[in-house]
Image: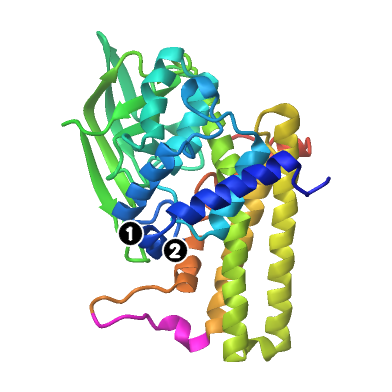
Amino acid sequence: MDFRDTPEEAAFRDEVRTWLAEHLVGEFAEVGARGGPADEEGYDIRLAWERELGRAGWVGMSWPKEYGGRGATILEQVIFNEEYVKARAPARVSFFGEGLFAPTLIAHGTEAQKHRFLPRIQSVEELWCQGYSEPDAGSDLSNVQTRAVLDGDEWVVTGQKVWTTLAHRADWCFAVVRTNPDAPAHKGISYLLIPMDQPGVSVRPLRQITGSAEFNEVFFDEARTARENVVGAVDDGWKVAMATLGFERGTAFLSQQLAFRRELADLFEVARRTGAGDDPRTRQRLAQAYAGVEIMRYNGLRMLTNIVRTGVVGPEASIGKLYWSTWHRGLGELAMEVLGPSSQVLSGPPGTYVLDDLQQAFLSSRAETIYAGSSEIQRNIVGERVLGLPREPRA
């Protein structure tokens, strides 16, 4: 594979760099690249920045032009994300709408749905959250119990979702709900779009070890949504839900290894400054971490090659998700060892203590082997759908 830009790609890269240099100034530059899409830090400024991106056509750039996109190729998306990370631009606010829901809608939605929702995602007028996990349906998503019953021209939704990221910020939720309780586990499920601002929806934050509360419990108590707000066929939402997970595990994280590379560079600097890198064992682990991020890069390129060839995100995306989440958890643990006793000390005056970037990475990475499909599920997918091994026995 030739990793060099073509003349057209080089011109596009220059366009991205120029735009970022001209617009990533003032408070936008001050917010910087700390945290991730789910974090709350600098949220209002990041929201304003996202709308700046939308006005310039960088939100939804991969969408077909008839839906307001640029029709950007996979490689152009990679270039944009590379330059975005290098510029230390703010974490994206519209991750769930643009990165997960929009490509699912383009693949499975009706024309009326696309023209209703895509423009408001691009302009960042409407934000989205993902209603998948429930208290008894995490990795086993087919066990969802939230019910939707048709009442005239509306669906009436009752149930509970949990670990719903930024639900308190969202205007809409794309949710997996059971519309036929008598059907087998993977049948009778529909992919439903539910407005959040209504009396039948309540959101309760879940305070985490990091001190933040971007995750929430969401309770639906006879919440309502229009009959036409089903993506795909009624009772056939499983394949639509799996498409969203494919985007979450695959293209939505195209630039992630660049952010990880930056974290690793910061850790190298800490090791040099503190002398921790003089220890042969620590130095070897740092070298292994560097090799790991390179492997991650080539895994990503392999996945991109398959997307370019087939046009879809295949089960190979699970290889990438399994690898990066495990690698990042190990990096967080290594960072705490390199920091030594100072890893236990928070900065800031009493009452306003804050985590530094490496402390935040360590704590946040503990959940990464669970969300977007747990590592156990990813291993099953790789074994069964990539390697062709026998299916795991079902109880």
Residue drawn at x 44%, y 63% as measured from the top left? 34
Q: Residues within 10 Å of mark 1 (few under 14, many from 20)?
A: some
Q: Nearer the viewer, residue 276 or 144?
A: 276
Left or right: 55, with 65 as reference point: left
Give yes or no for contact between labels 2 and 1 (Cβ–Cβ under 8 Å).
yes
Q: Which residue is mark 2?
A: 34
Amino acid type at circle 2 is Arg
Q: Quadrant of residue 72?
A: top right
Please tell me whether residue 322 is drawn above or below residue 391 in the rendered image.
Answer: below
Residue at the left extreme of this rendering: 199
Q: Quadrant of the N terminus?
A: top right
Secondary structure category for the residue under label 2: loop
Q: Over which residues does the magenta segment extend?
A: 340-350
Q: How far is the residue under mark 2 from the one under mark 1? A: 9 Å
Q: Quadrant of the C terminus?
A: top right
Residue drawn at x 34%, y 74% as measured from the top left? 354
Q: Sequence order check: which comes first, mark 2 or mark 1?
A: 2
Which circle marks residue 42 in the picture? 1
Amino acid type at circle 1 is Gly
User: Could one spot residue 132 in this view of the protein?
Assistant: no
